[in-house]
Amino acid sequence: MLLEELKTLVKYTLPVYGTHLLEHSLILASVVSIGHLSTIALAASTLGFMTVNVTGFSIVQGLASTLDTLLPGAWTSEHPQLVGLWTQRMIVVGAATMFPILAIWFNSEPILLLLRQDPEVAHLASVYLKWESLGLPAYTFNCISRRYFQAQGLFAVPTRIIIAVAPINILLNYLLVWGPEPIRLGFIGAPIATSISYNLISIASIVYGVWFVDKRAWHPISRRCLSNLGIVVKLGFAGVGQVASEWWSWELSGLGCRLGPTALAAQSVLLSSASTTFQAPFALSVATSVRVGNLLGEARGRRAGISANASIVTTFIVFRNKWAYLFNSDTEVVHLVASVLPLVALFQVFDGICGVTAGILRARGMQFTGAVLNLSAYYVVGIPFGVFLTLKRDMGLQGLWIGITVALVYGAAVSLWLCLRSDWEKEVRKVRERLEVDKKAMIAETVAAEGDV
């Protein structure tokens, strides 16, 4: 049974890995294209994207992680159309969430200046944010639609879409940042190219979902999409605490230490490096959430536990000196990156464990527990220690990354303990109770419809 689950997880993980790696390439292309304009431009794009992550993308990803709990179990239940219903509810919540995010993005310059960022960098970062806003609705929809497909075992669908869009994104980045004079836009070309790519993914997802996917998961659009939103919001806020707290630790620690342009540019390379290598354990995390959720929906608690245990595996790859030259030619930036990358390698071991166990916790609907764990790991232990090393011990970026690594050691140990002591039969009962409310509503609707006939 263990071997069978390992094979299934590998089968699920590979396309998810491809999807997330290629989606990450959308941002990577932007960083690379801007990085060779100037160190100031790279620092501004880094600050802009940090703000995008902290105030936007991390919030959306945290909210969407609710579907990792709700959709897999619904798909393998007696009423698979609940997958479509919960997806519609998440779209409603996601749409409402975009308004405060956009308000922050369009007023970001005074906020960044209040955080004592360099004025020139803060201004360029605010310009970056305004153009990046064109892609926020599409990014939100993509996070939701991807889970709609994955819950049904259609892991290859998002991969096929991103394979088609990723080369277009690279071409757009080149043309809009470095292309011929009539279409070259320079700095703002990168966020525009990324936003266009997000919208292309959304269009392709809609076309694929309407014409090429089994309709069993679809629920007709009705007022029911406005019901039971409390569950989505409750799990969503906990998901934000679980998912976003880690993103915030990377971004806010850099802002809090008031890094200069060179250090900020080096931080961009380090974050891109860490994010790239993290895609493998994160893909396994997503695959685990879906697989465990599907098994819980089928009331196969013991096998869900075996699948969860099989997923607790991770690897990492170490890159060093030459990696940094891909992003920026400034030798000072390159040397700073090289001095910190060994810490990033150590960081990846524990970050991988945290990523996989977070997927197991999401499958169990334990986003709140994950949120408390991450908040304590990063904001009680890791960030204060890292800021102390950076500012009081003059360790620079190395101190910052030592602090985050300490947080991950703590987080990995506690989350691993939580996952290994799970009661999987209890988790089956929780899924059944959650589905029961919508099942009763569907039966009542059916009876009412038959009475009208």
Image (tube, rainbow, N blue to C red):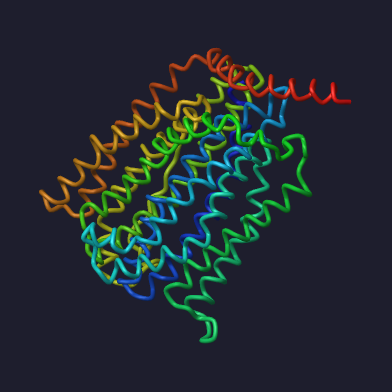
Q: Position of residue 115 (x, y in %)?
A: 23, 57
Please report the residue visible at 75 percent of the width from the left and 25 percent of the height from the top.
445
In the image, residue 360 above or below residue 58: above
Q: Quadrant of the C terminus?
A: top right
Residue placed farthest to the bottom in the image? 181
Q: Quadrant of the N terminus?
A: top right
Residue placed farthest to the left in the image? 392
The number of numbered badges drawn on the structure is 0
Residue placed farthest to the right in the image? 453
Residue placed farthest to the front in the image? 452
Q: Quadrant of residue 87?
A: top right
Nearer to me, 308 or 23: 23
Nearer to me, 124 or 354: 124
Q: Is residue 131 left or right of residue 290?
A: left
In the image, residue 87 above or below residue 178: above
Nearer to me, 170 or 49: 49
Please report the residue visible at 51 percent of the width from the left and 59 percent of the height from the top.
25
Q: Position of residue 368 (x, y in %)?
A: 41, 28
Q: Position of residue 412 (x, y in %)?
A: 36, 31
Q: Position of residue 105 (x, y in %)?
A: 40, 59
Please report the residue visible at 19 percent of the width from the left and 41 percent of the height from the top.
385
Q: Quadrant of residue 396?
A: bottom left
